[in-house]
Amino acid sequence: DAGVIQSPRHEVTEMGQEVTLRCKPISGHDYLFWYRQTMMRGLELLIYFNNNVPIDDSGMPEDRFSAKMPNASFSTLKIQPSEPRDSAVYFCASSLGGGGNNEQFFGPGTRLTVL
Amino acid sequence: SQQGEEDPQALSIQEGENATMNCSYKTSINNLQWYRQNSGRGLVHLILIRSNEREKHSGRLRVTLDTSKKSSSLLITASRAADTASYFCAFNDMRFGAGTRLTVKP
């Protein structure tokens, strides 16, 4: 397996633009997590899915952020409109099982810069 | 919130020395995991210790868990420059703390 795949790896956009980040989890994994990492706030859990259903989105900062998982092999994190404070590295991770009982596999991340 | 707090925030040692970092938590746990993050990369799983285990080894890594004190420690023996990274603990719903930044000087 190629591991968790994220695209794009780097994204530079201007304030107000829509940004869509993509993630392909490891085949067979039933949990998918989106994280955001910045120097100021560290690694924050934004949302996670189980069997394509959002379970906990309490970490999503505001309505400008939305995440979907239309099928078991694809998820998106959308920011609309983007703001400079959204600049961060966004990680996607997947695992077989949840509750901290199983290893998470992380993607390489998407480095987002909002000008 | 269900996230661990790693301590110390930063640790600098010489190659060959041992490095110990700690994780404290407030809730009950099923398991506790340790992860490593090299600069700019995704986290990599190191080891998982179950709540009924007290100690676990993996190569140069030794993890202990004290559920009565709600704490865990990660020991890296005979450290190498390549061990330079940030180390995080996580459990339950997989929220991460600020991590410990380890620097191993050659």
Image (spheres, rainbow, N blue to C red):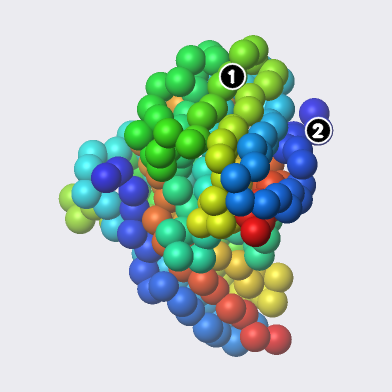
> Mark 1 and 2 residues: CB-CB less than 8 Å, in contact?
no
For marks 1 and 2, the one nearer the N-term is 2
Judging from the image, what secondary structure is the residue with disc 1 in? strand
Q: Position of residue A114 (x, y in %)?
A: 63, 54
Q: Residue at x 70, y 50 (%)?
A: A13
Vertical relation: A111 (above or below) B13: above
**Looking at this rendering, what residue extends furthest in the front direction?**
A16
Q: Which chain does the residue under circle 2 lie in?
A: A
- Amino acid bearing label 1: Met
Q: Residue at x 33, y 59 (%)?
A: B5
Can the viewer see residue A77? yes
Tell me, for residue A105, which label it has, or none. Answer: none
Q: Which chain does the residue under circle 1 lie in?
A: A
Tell me, for residue A69, which label it has, or none. Answer: 1
Q: Residue A50 or B55: which is nearer the viewer?
A: A50
Residue designated by label 2: A2
Q: Position of residue B99 (x, y in %)?
A: 45, 62
Q: Where on the picture, by quarter, is residue B73?
A: bottom left
Vertical relation: A31 (above or below) A13: above
- Amino acid bearing label 2: Ala
For mark 2, does the 10 Å Cα neighbourhood hold few (<14), some (14 to 19), or many (20 or more) residues?
Answer: few
Q: Position of residue B88 (x, y in %)?
A: 47, 56
Q: Where on the picture, by quarter, is residue A80?
A: top right
Q: Residue B25 or B50: which is nearer the viewer?
A: B25
For the C terminus of chain A, give its image quadrant.
bottom right
Between the C-alphas of marks 1 and 2, the distance is 19 Å
Q: Is residue B8 left or right of residue A15?
A: left
Can the viewer see residue B78? no
The reply to the same-chain question for discs 1 and 2 is: yes
Judging from the image, what secondary structure is the residue with disc 2 in? loop
